[in-house]
Image (cartoon, coloured by chain):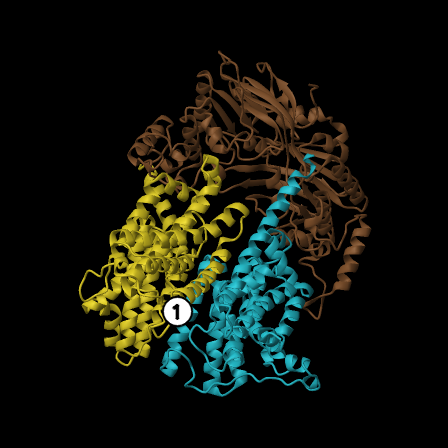
Amino acid sequence: MNPLLKSILSPQFVFAIIRVTTPLLFAAIGVAISVLSGSINIGLEGIMLISAFFGVIISAFTGSLVLALIGGILVGIGMGALLGYFHLKLKADIIIAAIALNMFASGITIFFLYIFTHDKGTSSSVKSLIFPSLQIPIIKEIPILGEIISGHNVLTYFALVSVALFYYLIYKTSLGLRIRAVGQNPDAAESVGVNINKIKLYSLLLSGFFGSLGGLYLSMGYVSWFSRDMTAGRGFIAIAAAALGGNFPLGTFLGALFFGIVNAIAIYIAPLEIPSEFIHSLPYFVTVVALAVYSIRLSRRKKILSKKEEI
Amino acid sequence: MEKFILKYFNLIRVAIAILIGIIISVCIIYIISKEPGISLKSLFLGPLLSKSRFGNFIETASPIIFCGLAIAIPFQAGQFNIGAEGALFIGAVVGTAFGVSTSMPAFLHIPLVLLVAGLTGAFWGFIPGFLKAKWNTSELVISLMLNYVAYFIGLYLINFHFRDKAAGYLVSYKLPETAWLVQFIPGTRIHVGVIISLGFAVLVYYFLYHTTLGYEIRTSGFNINFARFGGINVFKVIIIAQVIGGFIAAIGGMTEVMGVHRRFNWQLSPGYGWDGVVVAIIGRNNPLLIILSSLFLAYLRVGGRILNLLSDIPSEMITVIQSIIILLITAEAFLANWKYKITVREAKAKEVGNEPST
Amino acid sequence: MGNILSLKNIVKIYPNGVMANKEVSVDIEENTIHAIVGENGAGKSTLMKIIFGEEAPQEGEIYYKGKKVNIKNSLDAIKMGIGMVHQQLMLAPDLTVAENLILGIEPLRYGVFLDLKKITKLTEESSKKFGFKIPLNKKTRDLSIGIRQRVEILKVLMRNAELIILDEPTSVLTPQETEVLFKSLKDLKHHGKTIIFISHKLKEVKLIADKVTVMRDGKVISTNDVNQLDEHMIAHMMVGRKINFKRIPGAKKVGDPLFTVKNLSYLNEENIYVLKNINFEVKAGEILGVAGVDGNGQTELVEILTGLREATSGQIFIREEDVSRFSPREIREEKVAHIPEDRMKNGVAEHTTIEENIIVDRYYQDHFSNKNLFLDWKYISKSSEELIKKFKILTPSSKAAILSLSGGNIQKVVVARELSSNPRIIIAAQPTRGIDVGSEELIHNLLKDARDNGIAIFLVSADLDEVLKLSTRIIVIYNGEIVARFDDVNDITQRDLGPYMLGVKKKGE
């Protein structure tokens, strides 16, 4: 058997896919919620980064995983609130404001990293905690399947649960209904008494919540330290993942999974002859093509609609 | 006074935002630094205190100016193309590839290498431009994605085809000397590219405000319906603005390679594209103001580096400060109340003045 | 039966000084269909916005079910039992019908979760109760306009509206859809609802309404039982003001046809024919006026004539040349000038200077630029300053921003640009809308001079006075069709045009 094929068909490979998909999935859900409300949040990069950092620092200084979790989530939500405040209250362009917040996060994390550890690269000099992995009883005994499914980080399992949460939130709660309505036709929502700014703010806060979990996973699960700019563009990939999936729960999941698979392949074939750079660029390239095809179809549909009765 | 404030309100707003940023940095330094005097001096005077640092300051400004211009042109056309980073990267890669694989006299080599880089960047701007003009695809997301495509393809090209295996890390072969931009002030790395960047700023200014195409770009950006109504070919304008942006960004990347490193040595994307967004916003997309805002940003950057070196404050404080400044500048309602009050007062004063005196 | 709503002496003045409602008093009787008719700008929409809490009146009182009320916003109105179906339908396209229906009044379980069973039950019951056949689980995007409108009405009903305002509901509907709507409205009346129905179409008013209120110039002219009036009487009341203008002297030298339109039709994205088989020609030295209530296809017609929109079928000729597929630039190159109906949307870029606005159609020509490369700002300033003088534009300099000018002066900038382009055809849409009397007079004189210089002018205006004052010949457009042509306009009055504009009469062609 071809060694590449063999390694790709191994349970470890599928395990790796799930591992690398986790942070993307959290971030993509964060992006998708914001897009559904009509205010795209391209600040997930910064949200993840800042949560990753504070999770590590808090756990290192307090020794409490719970406090780290709470702290990390709160700063993530705080970033969402900040974006909401500047966009909704101070009328800043949401894209530029998010770009600024990404810079802010990159700067402030390294700034404090240096203050706390006198190191600008990583937090490895302080002892921080990680979230535990779960061995699922019974399932872990099943050959192959057990190897794939069991033994992941708790946050990975929560990422999968988050897809369901996202689904329930969007389709089964009044907040979700209102988020969708505001995104699709703000006037319509306002005309029945829905407060648009409030709903948009909520969606940005939720966006921050999911983003913060992605960040916490990165520094306290995926690896066990914080390093500068460790999100490495995952917040932007998330935009693409969500866009590929039409910003819907299942689609967003599949979009994130797609990028996860590609990344995992890139990791696995690194020792092989195919240049890994090609594989790494594939997700972005595919996004460009997919978005182009999507908009071509959209404009065709409009044209057909207006020409239908000409004949 | 109040009339003055109204007339220059936007500039004053920017100045106040910058001032707030500076005040915050002074506060941070006082809180954290054990020797605030030295820290303050390093940050605010550092770049002026030695020849080489001053050189650093100037040479850092150059690619930022290029990227500011590259972002400003699509912005002026109403296009949110933030792909300067990718155009710069891929342009520099292809330009370097061309440079190391050809040999000819300098007067041909330099412009040709720049041209190859520029055309590559232009193609990088064409993709989102065309997709937007033809099918209304979001240029923001496309250009963002293309930044990554540029990064990985660029790395691939260098790694597999132009890598100098003699060097310990991932760099390209050195450019032949015929493709070097001269560093013309001894003791610094200030190179001809700096002058080219200033030249480009003036050119772009002239282009935007004194040519018909520049007029078409600005008019489309201000009101695309009006442009279409007046007979301007908006399809063409949307594409061209982004093509020119890509071209300029790539030239910026290439001059940096030809003037400073003399070989391609970026393992990470250098981030100038994002700086370009920053300076374009601070400079209100005006090329001449972009020179100033780029110098300002470069000054802070180099000051920050010196601060980092000589004191206990990390240079990333500058990134934090610049993000706060941008947030304040882009927040339309920031100081709007103040302006409104002055406007009302002015209007009232006018009315009183107009009443016939009995 | 008592009055469900009484308005007493409502006065509404907008910040720009326009008095939209002048001491308006209307009583709406319970369980009736009450039509409110009037020309554009008669104040109907403002009055409806006041009832629905979207605008606050300066003076006057509102009584609802006998009690004096203060309606601060639309939520107040909804809570009181007033509902409004806007002309622009207020639906989220990717939500299902049921979701749109219960938005804002979602029944919940545990305070957060949508109670889907209850939602299904509620929406099904309501649609059954009012006899609305609507696919509740389809996305509204996939429904036709007529059905979407019914969703909107049901939405209002589900909020327990007793009084329902419909703002020109038939303007977007096909005749068949209109029939269905009317049947529903009659059913609603049987359910005890009261309906206020705004319309321009007097036939429809006769068909469906019990009472009709005529508004004109912000005032109520009369409120009557519909069966006491016929369509002609209503039309006369709507347009029958005193003649307060003098016709410009007739055209002297009318030449050959310059501009010819043949069998022009346009089908919009909603699959409705906005223009049907339009034919006309404009001769050199004449003004062809198009009379018609706004929204009868004029906007689309002008956009097609100027290359901004593509016709579905038909041809446009300038002399013998077919210009149907020309771009806006190519049309302008044929010496066609265009005064757009919405000057802020199409006519200017408000954040730029006067001169930058003036050159938009000529910046590439000789003198203004060097071989379409470099702009000559000196020449541009000089020629702009000349136009500012000639057209009496009030501004400190040609470098002042458009934003700093008044509406009348902005329109003068537009007119200055278009008339100075040396045109042989001028397409003028609403050339004096919303500007002061002085500017209006100036623009009218300019159009007359242009006509006398042998230019063919196509004038579209919802202001009947303007059409009558300027036109050499008049065509009337209604529902996308030319319904009347008047070649001799000397003895024509508003009363002659009114019935055609309002769809009461149609001339056999």
Residue A232 placement (x, y as % from top left): 46, 70
Chain A shade in the render: cyan
Q: Nearer the viewer, residue B302 or B332?
A: B302
From this view, report whether residue A185 is shown above or below residue A42: above
Figure quadrant of residue B151: bottom left
The correct choice, above or below, for A267 with respect to B153 in the image is below
Q: Residue at x 58, y 70 (%)?
A: A261
Q: Residues within 10 Å of mark 1 (few under 14, many from 20)?
A: few
On screen, residue C130 versus residue C233, left or right, reads right
Q: Chain of mark 1?
A: B
A65 lies left or right of C94: left
Q: Which residue is mark 1?
A: B267
Residue A210 visible, this orientation: no
- In this rendering, would C139 be left or right of B281? right
Closest to the observer, B29 or C64: B29
Which residue is at 70% across, 19% downward? C508
- Is residue B208 visible in the rendered structure shown here? yes
Q: Quadrant of residue A159?
A: bottom right
**What's the amino acid at mark 1?**
Gln
Q: Which quadrant would residue A112 be assigned to in this image?
A: bottom left
Residue lying furthest top in this view?
C252
Quarter the C terminus of chain C occupies: top right
Q: Chain in brown? A: C
Give the letter of the yellow chain.
Answer: B
Residue C506 sits above or below residue A156 on the image: above
Secondary structure of the residue carrying numbered label 1: loop
Residue under the image location 38 percent in, 70 percent down: B170
- Coordinates of residue C286 in the picture (x, y in percent): 51, 17
**Outermost residue toward the left in this view:** B186
Spot occupied by residue B14 in the image (x, y as percentages of width and height): 34, 57
Q: Nearer the viewer, residue B35 or A138?
A: A138
Image coordinates of residue A140 in percent, x first then y, are: 67, 85
